[in-house]
Image (spheres, rainbow, N blue to C red):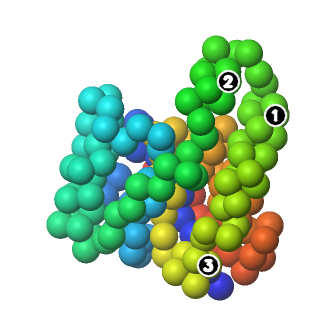
Amino acid sequence: MIKLFTIGFAGKSAENFFNLLRNAGVRKVVDTRINNVSQLAGFAKGADLRFFVKEIGDMDYEHKVDLAPTKELLTKYRDKNITWTEYEEEYLNLLDSRKIIQKIDFDQLHENCFLCSEHIPEKCHRRLLAEYLKHIKTNIEIIHLIR
């Protein structure tokens, strides 16, 4: 069974965030954000996060922009020009058009954690991505790190 974690950093202290990762046994944080250098990201800015996950939890870090939604798609949803259902459909179509299934090394996915900013996974692309992969490879257990 492949354990695939997801986490968002918003609403979490650095202590809580890194404890969640470490206690879950995450080996690699896969950053699925378009922009990982925003000042609003605090401790989760790309270069800082790479350092922190290695130092605090001996984890690897990778930023994979091709797993992120486009800026246009995010803007359409945030500006309420499309519904969540429409967002889901467009994001999943984007993953298909990017041929994500062929780019994912399922053998290396165990104990990886998809990262984005959203606190909870219900309306977040990291959940959609994890479920998309599970649809292809059914032996994936998705674990959302929330508290």
Q: Nearer the viewer, mark 3 or mark 1?
A: 3
Residue type for callout 1: Thr
Q: Amino acid at mark 2?
A: Tyr
Q: Residue at x 53, y 64 (%)?
A: 5
Please indicate whether residue 138 sits to the left or right of residue 111 in the image: right
For the residues labelled 3 and 1, say whether their Cβ atoms are less than 8 Å apart: no
Mark drawn on residue 85: 1
Is disc 2 placed on a helix, strand or loop?
Answer: helix
State the CA–CA distance, disc 1 to disc 2: 10 Å
Would you say 147 lies left or right of 89 here? left
Q: In whole angstroms, how far apart are the C-alphas of marks 3 and 2?
A: 30 Å
Pointer 3 residue: 106
**CA–CA distance in space, label 3 to label 1:** 27 Å
Badge 1 element: helix
Residue 35 numbered tag: none
How far across and down, in percent of the image, does residue 53 sit?
A: 27, 62
Whether residue 23 is visible here, answered yes or no, is no
Task: Point out residue 121 in the picture as x, y percentages from the top left corner.
Answer: 61, 46
| Residue highlighted by disc 2 | 77
Q: Position of residue 107 (x, y in %)?
A: 58, 84
Mark 2: few/some/many CA within 10 Å (<14, 14-19, 20+): some
Count the marks. Answer: 3
Of the image marks 3 and 1, the number of the one nearer the N terminus: 1
Q: Tell whether label 2 touches label 1 (CB within 8 Å).
A: no
